[in-house]
């Protein structure tokens, strides 16, 4: 476990952004493969503005621009990852334009492999309201599944379920929230499913179990991690003062016990952003 109480401990960290817990499976896969030999990572869970799924593109872009600007006063990251589909479709272009010196990596649903694998030519996509409604998702669907029917379902209740501790719930409770969506996709004739919200990765085993054997579930973890690794090859580190990962929570509320449990489970230290001297007014 890495412990810190100062921005001075970080040199060239990798930044991960999500509205909450959803991006942690992406962070974990990346960290398992790339933490050997040192390096530091900051995972920012924007609990203050959770959920993103009901906000407009403009609201999400403004939130993330302010958050990134404040963080960049303190650290110079090797790369920044939007480990959130909603944030990526809403704000990735804005962030790249606003902060062109930063290597930004986005996350989008695995529609391409799901469409290519579909035999019934009916592809399911689960996401937040904001992701499902975004034109970019339909563009992906047209590009890779032009002859396929796309059944796009908003599942914001699952996002909240996971954020509030659903990843630790009994299996029967997990199945209760996931099953209605699998049933709707099965009734529509879908034989593949692209998970379009990173929160759903915390229930991946449940989705796969309920969907089998006739619906194959796809996620974007490997593709995103591979892209991060490609970016880092072109952005070598200057050398690290420390080695480890820290989970940072936005907002001035105390750190809840559930978040401390999560930090321990992922081998991370945990802080509120203001405890590392980021002014609270930056997130109002």
Image (cartoon, rainbow, N blue to C red):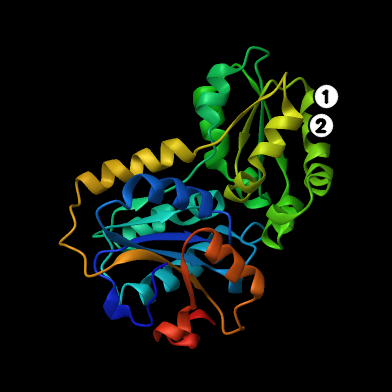
- Above or below, 242 against 150 in this view is below
Name the residue at 21% across, 65% down: 240
User: What is the spatial separation of the Cα atoms under label 1 and label 2, in whole angstroms?
Assistant: 5 Å
Which residue occupies the foreground of this view, 157 or 98?
Answer: 157
Give neighbour class at mark 1: few <14, some 14-19, many 20+ (Cα, 10 Å).
Answer: few
Residue found farthest to the left: 238
Would residue 36 be found to the left or right of residue 224 on screen?
Answer: left
- The picture places residue 33, in percent across and down from the top left corner, at 36, 44
Q: Residue at x 46, y 84 (%)?
A: 274
- Give the residue displayed 80% in from the left and 42% down from the top: 175
76 vs 39: above or below: below
Task: Give the farthest residue toward the top.
Answer: 119
Identify the element where label 2 is drawn: helix
Identify the mark at residue 152; answer none if there is no mark: none
The residue identified by callout 2 is 184
Say if 79 sits above or below 29 in the image.
below
- Residue at screen point 68% across, 13% down: 120
Q: In this view, does 45 lie to the left or right of 102?
A: right
Quadrant of res 54: bottom right
* Quadrant occupied by the C terminus: bottom right
Q: Which of 265 and 201 is in front in this view?
A: 265
Q: Is residue 143 visible to the viewer in this orientation of the structure?
A: yes
Residue in front for this viewpoint, 163 or 190: 163
Q: Is disc 1 placed on a helix, strand or loop?
A: helix
Query: Would residue 152 be visible to someone looking at this image?
Result: no
Q: Can you identify the residue that label 1 sits on?
A: 187
* Number of numbered tags placed on the structure image: 2
């Amino acid at each position: 476990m890495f412990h810190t109480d100062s921005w001075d401990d970080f040199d060239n960290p990798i930044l991960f952004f999500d509205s909450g817990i959803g991006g942690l499976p992406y962070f974990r896969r990346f960290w398992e493969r790339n933490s050997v030999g040192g390096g530091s990572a900051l995972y920012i869970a924007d609990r203050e503005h959770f959920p993103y799924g009901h906000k407009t593109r403009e609201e999400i872009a403004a939130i993330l621009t302010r958050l990134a600007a404040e963080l960049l006063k303190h650290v110079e990251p090797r790369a920044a990852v939007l480990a959130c589909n909603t944030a990526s479709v809403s704000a990735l272009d804005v962030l790249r334009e606003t902060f062109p010196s930063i290597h930004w990596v986005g996350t989008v649903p695995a529609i391409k492999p799901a469409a290519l694998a579909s035999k019934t030519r009916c592809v399911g996509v689960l996401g937040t309201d904001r992701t499902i409604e975004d034109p970019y998702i339909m563009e992906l669907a047209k590009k890779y599944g032009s002859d396929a029917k796309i059944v796009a379902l908003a599942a914001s209740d699952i996002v909240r379920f996971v954020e509030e501790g659903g990843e630790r719930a009994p299996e029967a409770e997990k199945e209760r929230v996931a099953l209605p969506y699998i049933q709707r996709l099965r009734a529509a004739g879908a034989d593949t499913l692209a998970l379009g919200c990173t929160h759903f990765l915390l229930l991946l085993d449940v989705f796969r179990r309920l969907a089998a054997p006739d619906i194959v579930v796809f996620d974007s973890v490997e593709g995103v991690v591979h892209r991060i690794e490609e970016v880092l090859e072109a952005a070598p580190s200057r050398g690290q003062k420390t080695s480890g990962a820290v989970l940072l929570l936005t907002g001035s509320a105390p750190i809840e016990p559930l978040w401390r449990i999560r930090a321990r489970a992922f081998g991370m230290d945990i802080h509120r952003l203001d405890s590392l001297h980021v002014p609270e007014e930056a997130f109002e």
